[in-house]
């Protein structure tokens, strides 16, 4: 039961509401008790002042204190209240009929307070008593009016009963309403849960229904839909990658199998076996390159910066080594390779020299491969605005404008037939881009069909 979010929310809501109601009831109860007592004191003082005023008038008419006492207590009658007249020392002189058996003695401190402030209050024998002087500035005596505290206790008792009945009822109704609201509020989440249960790798194109994209649940649904879109794209890229990798591996494996089967069909001469072995060697090397490229691309680009072996290195030396290695390819192809060194001295940075060499060699190999005999390839390295700028230019066939954004995709080749004939698998530029981005850099392309291409790599240097 407690595994349900609705139940937990309702219980938390009920607990907080119960504490709030109890605290509110205590505050109201004690405030009401104080107000009731203040009103009782005010009412008793008013009655005592009325008694004192009537006594003064009667005394002025009769000229006799005893006669004034008798007339006053005979004429004045207050339900549920007791009246007592005292002398200057607080001794009882006269009292109302309902107090004849219950005369109360007033403490001297209360009399002193009444003389000083004009009125005082004291609780005697469960009676609340108000005391005022009979005549101001004269020591004639005092008028005391009392009322049982049970009057306030009865009102407070009714208030307590109202709280004892009302608080649980309000709590019950509020809890039921809270559960309904929680269920209503969480119903979109239950709907999203039901929808996501039907989404798998086979139907990632499905999306959650967004009823209101402006509230929290709507924004959550939009976020989940965005996540599903990224997952769908990732799955599609993975399927395409597996399909392309399978296609690329199938060709050299088919050549290896076919050539070995042909060579084993009958006894052949040494030259024929040598030709077969050379073909097998070439295809095995091509297969080895494809497998190495696939292994490199299998590393997650997000985690690549953590897995790089970043060490201080001379980028100038790396570029120089790559130029010497690519010179062999250029001579074999009949292409001129020129190197332009930086005028600002050696350029150093932190990085993985093996990966950087592979990136530059991939660009140079790509340039030499697609530059016709007699063409030119150039490699330059300069320092610019805190960046190392590596530029590889060629005078090759160029890349159509519509396809320039796709050249860094895995297994993408502009001229598929020619690329396959040249031994390309469409992974070189993808690997180069991955290496550059893993070092925190950028790679760009400018190309004009029929005139050549220029690849620019910008790598951050340590300050």
Image (cartoon, rainbow, N blue to C red):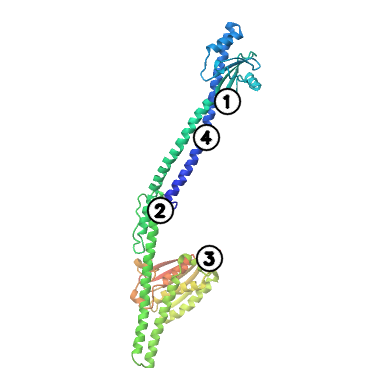
Camera-near label (3 vs 4) is: 4
The picture places residue 53, in percent across and down from the top left corner, at 56, 13
The kind of secondary structure element at disc 4 is: helix
Towards the viewer: 47 or 459? 47
Toward the top, the furthest residue is: 62
Going from N to C along the chain, the mark reached first, 3 or 4, is 4
Quarter occupied by the C terminus: bottom right
Residue placed under numbered mark 4 in the picture: 27
- Give neighbour class at mark 4: few <14, some 14-19, many 20+ (Cα, 10 Å): few
Examine the image and state in which quarter residue 95 appears.
top right
Are the residues at dot 1 and dot 2 in contact (C-beta closer than 8 Å)? no
Task: Answer with mark 2 or mark 4, whichever residue precedes in sequence.
Answer: 4
Q: Nearer the viewer, mark 3 or mark 1?
A: 1
C-alpha gap between disc 3 and disc 4: 69 Å
Q: Is residue 58 above or below residue 308?
A: above
Residue placed most toward the observer, 364 or 202: 202
Residue 79 placed where, x, y %? Answer: 51, 18
Q: Which residue is mark 1?
A: 126
Residue that numbered label 3 is attached to? 461
Secondary-structure class at tag 3: loop
């Amino acid at each position: 039961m407690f595994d349900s979010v609705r139940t937990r929310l309702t219980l938390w809501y009920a607990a907080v509401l119960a504490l709030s109601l109890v605290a509110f009831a205590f505050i109201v109860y004690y405030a009401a008790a104080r107000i009731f007592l203040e009103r009782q004191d005010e009412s008793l003082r008013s009655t005592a002042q009325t008694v004192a005023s009537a006594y003064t008038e009667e005394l002025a008419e009769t000229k006799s204190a005893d006669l004034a006492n008798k007339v006053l207590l005979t004429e004045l009658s207050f339900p549920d209240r007791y009246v007592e007249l005292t002398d200057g020392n607080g001794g009882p002189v006269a009292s109302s009929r309902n107090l004849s058996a219950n005369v109360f003695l007033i403490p001297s401190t209360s009399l002193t307070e009444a003389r000083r402030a004009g009125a005082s209050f004291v609780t005697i024998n469960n009676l609340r008593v108000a005391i005022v002087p009979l005549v101001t500035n004269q020591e004639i005596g005092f008028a005391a009016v009392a009322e049982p505290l049970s009057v306030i206790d009865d009102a407070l008792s009714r208030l307590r009963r109202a709280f004892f009945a009302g608080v649980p009822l309000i709590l019950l109704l509020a809890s039921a309403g809270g559960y309904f609201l929680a269920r209503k509020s969480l119903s979109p989440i239950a709907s999203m849960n039901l929808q996501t249960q039907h989404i798998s790798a086979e139907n990632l194109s499905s999306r959650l229904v967004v009823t209101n994209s402006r509230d929290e649940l709507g924004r959550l649904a939009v976020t989940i839909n965005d996540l599903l879109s990224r997952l769908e794209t990732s799955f599609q890229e993975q399927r395409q990658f597996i399909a392309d990798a399978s296609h690329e591996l199938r060709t050299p494996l088919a050549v290896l199998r076919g050539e070995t089967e042909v060579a084993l069909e009958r006894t052949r001469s040494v030259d024929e076996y040598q030709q077969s072995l050379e073909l097998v060697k070439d295809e095995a090397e091509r297969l080895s390159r494809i497998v190495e490229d696939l292994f490199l691309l299998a590393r997650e680009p997000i985690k690549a910066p953590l897995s790089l072996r970043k060490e201080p290195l001379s980028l100038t030396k790396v570029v120089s080594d790559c130029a010497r290695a690519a010179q062999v390819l250029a001579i074999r192809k009949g292409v001129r390779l020129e190197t332009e060194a930086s005028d600002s001295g050696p350029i150093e940075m932190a990085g993985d020299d093996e990966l950087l060499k592979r990136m530059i060699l991939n660009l140079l190999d790509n340039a030499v491969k697609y530059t016709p005999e007699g063409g030119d390839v150039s490699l330059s390295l300069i320092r610019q605005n805190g960046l190392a700028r590596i530029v590889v230019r060629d005078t090759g066939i160029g890349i159509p404008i519509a396809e320039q954004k796709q050249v860094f995709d895995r297994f993408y080749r502009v001229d598929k037939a020619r690329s396959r004939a040249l031994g390309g698998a469409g992974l070189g530029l993808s690997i180069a881009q991955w290496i550059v981005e893993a070092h925190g850099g950028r790679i760009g392309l400018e190309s004009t069909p029929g005139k050549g291409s220029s690849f620019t790599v910008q790598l951050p240097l340590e300050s």
